[in-house]
Structure formats: structure tokens, C-alpha cells
Image (cartoon, coloured by chain):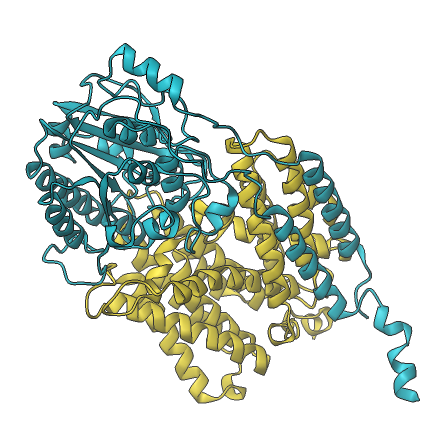
Chain colours: A cyan, B yellow
Amino acid sequence: METVEKKNSPERLDPASPRLRLAVPAVLAIAAALFALRPGASGRALAAPAPPSPHPPLTRRVVLVVLDAWRRADALDATRMPTVARLARGGVLGPMETGVRTFTKPCFAEMLTGGGSTLRDSLLNLARNPAPAESIFGRARAGGAGMRLIDATSDFVDLFSREIPTDAIVRVDPGAPSPDPDDVFNDQGIESAVLEALARPSLRLVAAHLQSVDHAGHLFGAAGPRYAAAVASADRRVGRIAARMDLANETLVLVGDHGADLSGHHGGPESAARETAYLAAGSGIRARPAGLLPSTAIAGLVTGLLGDCPPSAAPPGGADALLALNDTARVRTASICPCRSGAPARSRPGLAAAGAALVLAGIAGSSAPRPR
Amino acid sequence: MSALLLLVLGFAPDREDAAIGLLAFFLLGTAWALRRVSGRGTLVAAIAPIAAIAATRWIPGESSAVRWLAGAAVVAVAAASWQGSGQAATPRWLIGISAAALLAAFFHAALPPESPTIPFSPPLACGQAALGFGWLLLAAGAALEDHRLQVCGSLAAAAVYLHGLPLAALAFVELSILFPPPNGAEPRRTEAARSVAVAISLLAVFNGGYGFSRIDLSLMSLGASASSAMFVPIAGVIVASAYAWTLLVARRFALAGGRRLSRGAIAYGFLVLAGTDLIRLALARPDSVSAARSEERLVFDLAFALLSCVVELPLFSARPAPNRAPTPAAVES
């Protein structure tokens, strides 16, 4: 009887109760997180079957190399990256700007689908998070192009596994020993796999992800000698890949997924993290200055080189300045390629109301009496 | 007062700058109060290397001199804190562990960084040892209600989490916990505002703070094994521990000097900030820089609210530090 009375006593509902004072903010925080990060906020979906090819391919093969955390300052500095500068003389090298979310996965998704990203993409950067829109890989596969994706991380697989044949993926062990002391994430293994893929004429799209520069930035900062050595090593690696290509009939596209600040950090909308670069050289590239490109233009660049329509989320005409297309091909591309790009929808009144509720709950909780 | 400060922080155009200003204000206030505590030559001894760190902060790059000075400051502060502290009540093995933790932290800060992919990396091993020992000492100090042990543990972890000026600021905060101002040095009504504001200010100034770009991902290397790449879950725990540790410091700072802090106060503070984030998000243009900043602040505020709840669990809620400031009666005698 005494126990029952104790359970029903007013003390259990005391706002100063330690349990209640910890449980309420925890529950409210979890509820707010679920509300803000609810899936489907972007409203995007995989597209319908691919449209017909708008023009003949401009190249026999595209080799797309993503240099993780390629800082613009390094890319445009010929003393730091002499090979890139040399390749740019026969192609085009310019600045590129990513979206406002600069972790690797959101940047990959934006660059290879041409669409936007959401907070959810940033938060699931280290998790499996399939891209909700079609990518260049889906377009290439629909067009019958053989492809190979080479990576030491799971980024390609996590994002695009629905569009990639299983046998097209090559995973390299990042911990395998490399003869290069500045190669901290086994880019040497990536390079070997790319060179092996170049020996197969049936592969029309080869995509590779070099990560040692990003890794060196995170470990040692981007201002020191270890980072500079990693950049120089990546420059030589790109040179060796280009040397094995027939740039009269093939195309090398080198892009950064994002930049980094001098501490090697990225992830948010800071300008240093959004500033990266692109290099396009070889067949189908119009060798003239193209200025600043948004990273979403890369999807249209690759599909344009392969003679496919851009992914439906890509901005129309985003890569026109780089492609050696005549006016007829441009008009045809614009007329038959579907485009439905747009900013993700968001319920603004709902967000504001939820915010006001949290503010009031927080103030009420802060003002509650303290335990005696 | 607390709610008003939080709303000012929440709607400030640059919350980090506002938080840094608040922290500076409170640290200066603490320094002013500390001057009234007699016989604290150790404070001067500790401030000298801290000032040197602050001066060398502007050396280009991550100079090894900065790291050496940071390590020296940590050891100096720890040595000062042990002097005349009545260690007799502390088990000898804990004293040994704290010495090992500080040494490991010292060498981690002093040795140049190396790649985690090499077979054995002394700086990484020292860092891992310092973190392990540091957290062990924090827990042991809380269990034994020994604030010197907690200070040693906190400083050992700090030398891994922080470098340069933030480490100096942390050493100052730890000193103020060891030597709290006399009772009544601060109006009672401002206590809650002080604690919440300091918690947020510490996060803005210390490791990580607000923003994905500011997460110190180099900490992830401490989760690397000798032969392969990072083990993401462990690396994630190590990064998260940096934030939990900052909140613990903030809470200990708020409790120093015998103040009472209601449970959940810091968590409720972060809820207020999360609410302002949502309102700002509703007002911002989608995919704009402003929207992205509000988004990442929202993530951090919600994460900190949850972490605050964990930090305020009974394990880490030892009684406030004893106030050893001389009472008027003692001074007269």
C-alpha cells in the first residue's frame, strides 16, 4: 500500500525530477532530428528509360579520375602540378564550384547525377546511401557502354550500385603497401587497375577515385610538406595514366569532388571547401577557356562525350562550353533530352512551427525549478 | 537571462564569433576573480607558457615548436596542480597512470605526425594511450571525487584533441576549476546563464565546434589499426568523444565553486538553439550557404543536446570542487 502511494505521489511528476529533466530534452532532440531528416524531402526519383542518343559519341572512351579534395589553389598552380598544366595546354583547365555540402558522397552525387543534395546526404556520408536520381553510369549502361569503376572506398558502390553491373566494380585494398611513401591510401593500386582497364577496348567509361591527397590533408593539414608531396605524387600518377591513353581518340576528365581548407577540413559550405577544379583533355574537348563551372555540369560533360543525354536532374547545357558540338547537335540535345532539375521542396511553415516549439520547450525547461 | 543569451546566440549572424566573445568575457571574469585568491604563484607559472603558445599561434603551418610548447604547458599545469594537493588520499597506481597519461599526451603533441598505414607509429600509439588514460582518469576522478585526477585526465585528452590557443584556453579553464573564485564572487542569478553560455562557447572555440568543415578528422587516425585503413566505428567514437569531453569540461566548469546546476540545463539550452536553427532554415533559400549553415548547426545542436544528456548522467556528476579560497575568518587568523 505504501509503495503504491509512493508511486502515485506528486514527486514523480516534479519538473525538477532528474530523470524527467534528462528524458524530455533527449526525446525532443530525437523527434526534431527525425522531423528535419525525414526521407523523401528532396522529392527526387530514378528516371524513366533513357531517351535515344542525341548525337554520335565524341570520343572512343572517357577516363574520369576524381581527385578527392583537389584544392583549386593546387590545381591551378603549375609549379605544384606541372603534369596537369602540361595536359591543359591541349585541353581545358578551370575552376569548379561544388554545392554547399562538401562531404565526398554529396559531392559525388551532385557531380555524377547533376542534381542537388540534401542534409541527409551529408549525414550518411559514411553509410550506404543510394543516390536517388539517375547518374552518368545509368545513362552509359542504358547506352550499352562497357564501364569500370575503381575505388579503394565504397563510395561508388554505396551511391550507384543500382546502376552498375557487379562485375564493373574493382575494389582496391587501401591498406596494401605502396612503394610510394607519399601514397597514404594506396592510389598506386588504383593506378594499376586503371592501366589494366585501359588495355580493354570494350570499356568506354572508366571511373577512378584517388584519395591520398584528401587523406594527407586530414592527417597532416594542407599547408605542410607531406600534403604537398601527396599532391605532387597525384600529379605524376595522372601523368602516367594520360601517357597510356590515346588522347586523339580518348578523353581524360580530371575533377576534384571538393576542396579543403588549410587544415584539410571540408564538409560545410565554406568557400575553401567548395573551391576545386576540372581538367578535360583529348577527343571531343573544345580547347578554350571555359571559366567557372558548377560541379553539376560534369554529368553533362561525360554523357555528352559518350553521345548520351545528360541525367535528367542535370542542368540543361551545363557542359556546352567544353564540348566540341556543332549547333545542330546542341539543338537536338536540347529538344530530346528531358530535364527536370530544381531545388528540393521543403515545408517552410512546418519548419518554422517546429522551431518555435523547440525554442519554447527549451526556455520552459531552462526556467524550471532546480532540485533542492 | 539564460534564455535571452541563448536567443542572442541563436539569431546572431555569426554564432561562433558571438560564442567566442562570450567565452572571452567569462574567462576574463574568472581571471579577475582568481586574483582575489591568495598564494597562487602556480597560476603565473602556468600562464607563461600559455602566453607563449598564444604568441606562436601565428607561426605559419603547424610548427613543431607550437606542439612542444603545448606539451610543455600541459605538463607544467599538471605539475602545478599536483603540488600540495593532498595526494595521500589518492591511490598510488592512479598517480602512476596520470603521470603516464600526461607523458603520452606530451609525446603525442611533440612528435611529428605519421601515416597510420605504416606498421607502427609512435605518435599514434602515444595519442591512443593518452586518450585511454585520460578518460580512465576522468572516470576515476569522478568516482573518487578527486578533482586533481579529473584535471590530469582532462589535460591528457586535451593534448590529443586540441593544439595551440584552444589548448591554452582549456588549461586556463582547468586552472579555474582547481582554484575557483570565493563564494559569492558571482551573483547567483547569472549561474545558469553562465553555464549554458560557457558550454556553447567552449564548443565554438575548442575542437570541432559548429560545422562539418571544422570536425577534426585527423582524430580518426587514432582509430586506425597498424595494417589497414581506419575502422570507421572506432574512429567515429573517438571524434564523438572530443565533443563529449568538451561538454564535460563545460559542466565541470559550471559546477566549480560550489554552484548548483540543474540536470538537463545544458541540453535544454541546445534545444533553444536547435529551434532557432529550424526557424532560420525556414527563412533561408534552399541550397543556399545560409541554409547549409543552419542545417549543420541544427545537426550539431541536436547532437549536443543528446550528448549533454549522457554527460549529465550520475557517473560524471560528482560533487562540485571544494572551494579552497581562504575565508575572511581564516585570513584574519
The answer to whether residue A272 is seen in the rendering is no
Q: Position of residue B7 (x, y in %)?
A: 70, 42
Snapshot quadrant of residue A296: top left
Q: Nearer the viewer, residue A177 or A268?
A: A177
Residue A370 can be seen, yes or no? yes
Report the front residue among A122 and B156.
A122
Front-most of residues A312 and B316 = A312
> Is residue B264 rendered to the left or right of residue A221?
right
Does residue B39 appear to the left or right of B44 in the view shown?
A: right
Q: Is residue B8 left or right of residue B220?
A: right
User: Could you tell me residue B182's position as x and y percent?
Assistant: 68, 64
Q: Residue at x 90, y 72 (%)?
A: A10
At x 73% / y 53%, what residue is drawn?
A: B190
Q: How many marks?
A: 0
Residue A172 occupies quadrant? bottom left
**Observer-nearest residue: A243 or B99?**
A243
What residue is drawn where x is 28% and y is 15%?
A329
Position of A198 relative to B186 (above/below) = above
B160 sits left or right of B304 in the view: left
Give percent across and percent down for residue A279: 22, 30
**Outermost residue toward the top in this view:** A327
Residue A132 horizontal/vertical position (percent): 46, 43
- Quadrant into which the C terminus of chain B falls: bottom right
